[in-house]
Amino acid sequence: MPKVLIVEDEPLIRLLLEQTLEGFEDHGVEVLTVDNGLDAVEMIRAERPALVLLDVMMPKMNGFEVCSFVKQQLHMNDVYIIMLTSKGQEQDKLKAIEAGTDEYITKPFSIQEVADRVAAALKIRI
């Protein structure tokens, strides 16, 4: 059963993302959530999700640090990371690429775009 981890410190955005991914449960996808970067690293290490929706600006550890740690320290290159952020500057995108992100979506984002990208990454037809 593939797992998707939502890492978002804003409760309303986290809930919106959870609701967006509810339909994936019909395809055997388990949705997990955490609200900070430190818990994200521990959850990724323990659960090894197929995909992570990762906020950038979070307490304890930001998304750039989480992504870099997962990809470079834990060597979990098979974990697909989609960063979701309000940081849309070119330098932020470059920083995300350097950290190892697979995709970068700026907020406000389209729910359909997120669902489509998750489906494509997991190779699921929705």
Image: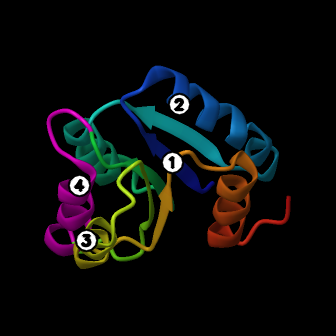
| Residue placed under numbered mark 1 in the picture | 107
Mark closer to the chain start, 4 or 2: 2
Label 4 near label 3: C-beta < 8 Å?
no
Seen as rendered, the residue at the extreme right is 126
Q: Please indicate whether residue 12 sits to the left or right of residue 97 in the image.
A: right
Q: Residues within 10 Å of mark 2 (few under 14, many from 20)?
A: few
| Residue placed under numbered mark 2 in the picture | 13
Mark closer to the chain start, 3 or 4: 4
Q: Amino acid type of disc 3?
A: Gln
Picture layout, residue 8 above or below residue 103? above
Label 1 near label 2: C-beta < 8 Å?
yes
Q: Residues within 10 Å of mark 3 (few under 14, many from 20)?
A: few
In which quadrant of the rendered view does residue 87 lie? bottom left
**Could you give the CA–CA distance between mark 3 and mark 4, rounded to whole angstroms?**
18 Å
Seen as rendered, the residue at the extreme top is 11
- In the image, is residue 125 part of the stretch drawn in magenta? no
Magenta portion: prevailing SS class: helix
| Residue placed under numbered mark 4 in the picture | 66
Could you say which is closer to the camera, residue 89 or residue 120? 89
Could you say which is closer to the camera, residue 121 or residue 89? 89
Residue 35, horizontal then vertical, whole percent:
35, 30
